[in-house]
């Protein structure tokens, strides 16, 4: 039978299929962080259950960590307590723990690939919806709730109905100044935030083949923003080259055996999907969001759509524009901004900082802009220094912070003040996401850099040398 | 038994006719710092419910005593965004046992089922009728019958069936949870794991 990539990985992990119910799915690798795991460990304690396979779970602190002075005790007692709980739980159950200050610490979806925990054909879960990131390697990776975190700790399995399958193909190549983030925001703007709910997505076609592994991670990361449980891309030479030699990557005979499996991981010719969408790379411009969900995105040069031209309720649409302080039909170009945030599991990798540097090099940060540059991990931070990017940032009056999720969800002190506009490379522009009353404009690192230099929404193509 | 069982619920309902209600609205991230599952209901819809000085926003539905009940009725694509189960906990802790919408985000729906809150998906037309009926008479009652997989509106007698898989239905009716099921499969899981390299 002709199978899709998704079928191959899913079906090979089904321990048991319940009649008229979900599949019992075996989980190869489980990542945990401080926010969604403590109640799961409490559940284990109440049931007097051990962690079945502690070597398959990896813990890192990221959501609730400061991005300045990480060598000091965490000032907020609630945050400190949550971080302490993660450390104690990991230690008590023999789980690898990369806490604050650890050289491997960073955002869970950044460090997983960096150390080879993320591998093709694996099932990977985490109590975080952006777990879809790991699908870039041809893994089935998705976010779960805390009850499911407890299930995985106790039994290495979760119970999930098999999702439907969607393939999104983008042919051709991308225009100058168009990044993987723009590709994702473009797709979400076409599908809306619920257009892929109930589906698992495979991204295919020349555009995705041409993307780097980090670019693929950015696209897969945002799969959840169109409602999909996850998105994946068939592994290829680029994938194998990326993972080779990393700490948790198999070596020698184990590598050969793994490769024999990984090379089968593609959708068979003639396999069918429940839904197929096809776009052309040349259709995509640099994108920016103007509303309060990631589906409310548009080409940076266009005008904000009118309520009558969008699907769904006009009342909700107008409420969203009111929150943003924008009106239908306005141009986004030239609108003033207050903050710029570079970072997150979406765009906090070294290629994102290189892209940012390519525009800010030799220029100066606009005086009306506060910018937070937050690397996704200590490894990214080290590369920023080694490659001389820090010198470029400092010369342009930018400050580099320490790794963490930071202003993406503003659990720590990195909050955008009420009413202020932030051009952010993160993943969600929900009301108050970056702090109560904050107004988020999602965009690529290039668009963020152009905004940081000019102090307003600017087409980055006008600044690219 | 991991949570309350659910069979038939008859209650008035609280209407929230807004689309794409995301989990950051249901419970903002700054309230996710607890290490125990207590008190999340106090911060349900925090930033829609309270001003920044913690005074209630009088026009938000949870601050309007006219609307009460164990059923929350939301617009299309309810619960989108983050996987935080805290959102489902907040809904439960506030006192809701059922959420009705014309469409649910995937992870939120799963989280609800895992803690004993029943997500009931109805047609867009029926959802509009429910909103209208509650607006006309806040004392309007809804009856959700899990056995029959049916939801009905007392005022008009209109009813609709809803989907839930047989396994989850059984869990909800009895208050069973997945860990009990999986724990009894341990030998099969261990055997499976032996053929699955790390």
Image: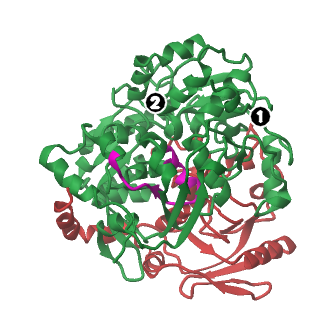
Observer-side mark, 1 or 2, equals 2
Q: Position of residue A324 (x, y in %)?
A: 78, 42
- Chain of residue at mark 1: A
Q: Which residues are magenta?
A: A218-237
Name the residue furthest front.
A172
> Residue B37, relative to residue A406: is it above or below?
below
User: For residue A221: magenta?
Assistant: yes
Q: Nearer the viewer, residue A331 or A381?
A: A331
Q: Considering the numbered disc 2 on the image, is that residue within a helix, a strand or a loop?
A: helix
Q: Residues within 10 Å of mark 2 (few under 14, many from 20)?
A: many
- Disc marking residue A350: 2
Of the chain colours in the picture, the one used for chain A is green
> Residue B7, relative to residue A196: is it above or below?
below
Quarter residue A26 falls in: bottom left
Q: In screen coordinates, is A420 left or right of A171?
A: right
Name the residue furthest top.
A395
Number of marks in picture: 2
Q: In screen coordinates, is A192 left or right of A346?
A: right
Q: Nearer the viewer, residue A209 or B49?
A: A209
Q: Measuring 48% from the left and 50% from the top, which residue is drawn there? A: A208
Q: Nearer the viewer, residue A213 or A87?
A: A213
Q: Measuring 33% from the left and 47% from the top, which residue is drawn there? A: A237
Q: Measuring 33% from the left and 40% from the top, which residue is drawn there? A: A242
The quadrant of the rendering that contains the C terminus of chain A is top right
Q: In the rendered image, which residue does mark 1 sit on?
A: A419
Q: Residues within 10 Å of mark 1 (few under 14, many from 20)?
A: some
Q: Position of residue A147 (x, y in %)?
A: 42, 59
Tell me, by letter, which chain the rendering colours red. B
């Amino acid at each position: 039978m002709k199978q899709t990539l998704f079928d191959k990985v899913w079906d090979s992990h089904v321990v048991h299929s319940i009649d008229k119910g979900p599949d019992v799915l075996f989980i190869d690798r489980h990542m945990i962080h401080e926010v969604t795991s403590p109640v799961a460990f409490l559940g284990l304690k109440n049931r007097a259950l051990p962690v079945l396979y502690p070597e398959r779970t990896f813990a890192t602190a990221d959501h609730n960590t400061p991005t300045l002075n990480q060598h000091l005790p965490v000032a907020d007692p609630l945050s400190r307590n949550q971080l302490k709980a993660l450390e104690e739980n990991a230690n008590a159950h023999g789980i690898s723990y990369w806490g604050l200050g650890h050289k491997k610490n960073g955002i869970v979806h950044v460090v997983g690939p960096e150390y080879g925990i993320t591998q093709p054909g694996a099932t990977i879960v985490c109590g975080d919806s952006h777990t879809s990131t790991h699908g870039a390697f041809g893994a089935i990776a998705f976010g779960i709730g805390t009850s499911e975190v407890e299930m995985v700790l106790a039994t290495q399995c979760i119970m999930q109905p098999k999702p439907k399958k969607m393939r999104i193909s983008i042919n051709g190549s991308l225009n100058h100044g168009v990044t993987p983030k723009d590709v994702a925001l473009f797709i979400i703007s076409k599908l809306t935030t619920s257009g892929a709910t109930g589906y698992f997505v495979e991204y295919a076609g020349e555009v995705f083949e041409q993307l780097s592994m980090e670019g693929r991670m950015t696209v897969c990361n945002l799969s959840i923003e169109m409602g999909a449980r996850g998105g994946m891309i068939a592994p290829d030479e680029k994938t194998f080259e990326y993972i080779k030699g990393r700490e948790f990557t198999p070596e020698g005979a184990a590598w050969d055996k793994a490769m024999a499996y990984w090379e089968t991981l593609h959708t068979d010719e003639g396999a069918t999907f429940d839904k197929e969408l096809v776009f052309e790379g040349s259709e995509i411009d640099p994108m920016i969001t103007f509303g309060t969900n990631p589906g409310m995105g548009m080409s940076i040069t266009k005008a904000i759509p009118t309520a009558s031209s969008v699907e769904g309720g006009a009342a909700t649409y107008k409420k969203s524009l009111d929150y943003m302080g924008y009106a239908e039909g306005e141009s986004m170009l030239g609108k003033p901004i207050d903050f710029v945030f570079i970072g997150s599991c979406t765009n906090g990798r070294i290629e994102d900082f290189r892209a940012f540097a390519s525009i800010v090099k030799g220029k100066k940060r606009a005086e009306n802009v506060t910018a937070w540059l937050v690397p996704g991990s200590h490894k990214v931070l080290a590369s920023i220094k080694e490659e001389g990017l820090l010198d470029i940032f400092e010369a342009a009056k930018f400050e580099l912070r320490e790794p963490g999720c930071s202003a993406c969800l503003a659990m720590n002190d990195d909050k955008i003040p009420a009413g202020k506009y932030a051009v952010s490379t993160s993943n969600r522009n929900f009301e108050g996401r970056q702090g109560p009353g904050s107004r988020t404009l999602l965009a690529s690192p290039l668009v963020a850099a152009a905004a940081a230099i000019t102090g307003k929404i600017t087409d980055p193509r006008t600044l690219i040398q | 038994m991991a949570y309350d069982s659910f069979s038939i619920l008859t209650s008035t309902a609280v209407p929230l006719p807004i689309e794409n209600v995301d989990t950051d609205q249901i419970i903002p991230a700054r309230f996710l710092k607890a290490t125990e599952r207590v008190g999340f209901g106090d911060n349900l819809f925090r930033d829609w419910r309270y001003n920044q000085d913690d005074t209630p926003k009088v026009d938000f539905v949870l601050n309007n005593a006219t609307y009460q009940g164990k059923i929350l009725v939301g617009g299309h694509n309810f619960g989108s965004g983050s996987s935080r189960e805290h959102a489902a906990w907040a809904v439960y802790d506030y006192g809701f046992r059922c959420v009705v919408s014309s469409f649910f985000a995937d992870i939120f729906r799963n989280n609800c089922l895992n803690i004993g809150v029943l997500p009931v998906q109805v047609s867009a037309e029926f959802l509009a009728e429910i909103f209208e009926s509650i607006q006309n008479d806040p004392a309007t009652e809804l009856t959700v019958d899990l056995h029959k997989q049916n939801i009905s509106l007392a005022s008009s007698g209109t009813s609709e069936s809803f989907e839930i898989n047989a396994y989850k239905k059984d869990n909800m009716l009895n208050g069973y949870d997945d860990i009990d099921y999986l724990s009894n499969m341990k030998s099969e899981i261990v055997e499976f794991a032996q053929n699955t390299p790390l």
